[in-house]
């Protein structure tokens, strides 16, 4: 299934394509799109049809104008961010990100990474299954991004504030009223993955 250049794939689109794949006797559906609606994240199979979602890099829009450095991925299929839910005082919870799995189509391998490969991870602490609302954001990476920010701003950065944002463990928050949280992670290539967790 190849989505239109400026369209966002909805869950019913993938369901329809999976039904068509089943009728044709296929064992899997590979959906390729620039953007997926949030309700597609946990849709991994339809009956016996395995559903793989490949997110096309937005740089494909400018493919003829960009120099090929070999450092980016034009098509990326993700696993999910590896997330742990931690109990905190006063019945609050926190999330820890341990890494993310990335599928490399060029070598047909899954690479498991640690938090250093994640540029940004965000939490919607009360996910409503319609839209992702950033309630927490954390900036990671092997190289300390705050030293560059400090130089750019020519100012001191509060160390306590810095540590709370440069962390693989979130600040504590109340359990979600909806019963779900969503975690979105973006690596240094701009590839994005999201996981919905029932609390």
Image: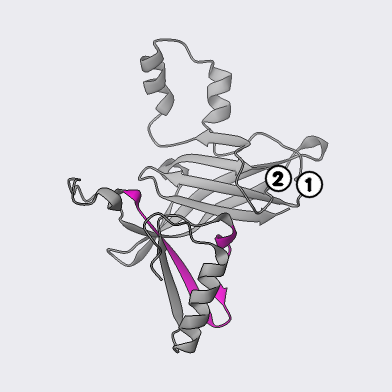
Give whichever of 12, 29 is nearer the camera.
Answer: 12
Q: Residues within 10 Å of mark 2 (few under 14, many from 20)?
A: many
The answer to whether 163 appears left or right of 25 in the picture is right
190 to 159, vertically: above or below: below
Residue 32 appears in the figure: yes
The answer to whether 137 appears left or right of 29 in the picture is right
Image quarter of residue 125: top right
Do tag 2 and tag 1 residues touch (Cβ < 8 Å)? yes
Looking at the rendering, the stretch of residues picked out in magenta corresponds to 39-58
What residue appears at the point 57 percent right and 55 percent down from the top-left corner?
38
User: In what element is the residue under mark 1?
Assistant: loop
Q: Residue furthest right?
A: 90
Q: Mark 1 points at which residue?
A: 177
- State the quadrant of the N terminus: bottom left
Image quarter of residue 111: bottom left
Q: How is the image coloured?
A: one colour
What residue appears at the point 35 percent right and 52 percent down from the top-left corner?
57
- Residue 126: mark in rendering: 2
21 to 70, vertically: above or below: below
144 to 69, vertically: above or below: above
User: In what element is the residue under mark 2?
Assistant: loop
Residue 30 painted magenta:
no
Q: Position of residue 178 (x, y in %)?
A: 76, 50
């Amino acid at each position: 299934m190849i989505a239109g250049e400026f369209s966002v794939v909805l869950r019913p689109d993938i369901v329809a394509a999976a039904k068509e794949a089943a009728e044709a006797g296929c064992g899997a559906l590979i959906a390729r799109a620039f953007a997926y609606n949030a309700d597609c994240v946990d849709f991994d199979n339809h009956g016996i049809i395995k559903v793989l979602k490949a997110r096309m890099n937005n740089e494909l829009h400018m493919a003829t104008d960009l120099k090929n450095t070999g450092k980016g991925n034009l098509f990326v299929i993700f696993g999910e961010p590896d997330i742990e839910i931690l109990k905190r005082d006063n019945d609050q919870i926190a999330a820890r990100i341990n890494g993310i799995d990335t599928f490399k189509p060029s070598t047909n391998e899954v690479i498991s990474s640690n938090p250093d490969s994640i540029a940004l991870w965000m939490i919607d602490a009360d996910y409503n299954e319609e839209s992702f609302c950033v309630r927490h954001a954390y900036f990671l990476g092997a190289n300390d991004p705050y030293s560059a920010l400090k130089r750019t701003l020519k100012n001191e950065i509060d160390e306590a504030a810095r540590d709370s944002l440069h962390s693989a463990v979130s600040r504590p928050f109340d359990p979600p009223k909806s019963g779900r949280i969503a975690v979105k992670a973006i690596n240094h290539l701009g590839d994005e993955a999201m996981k919905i967790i029932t609390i």
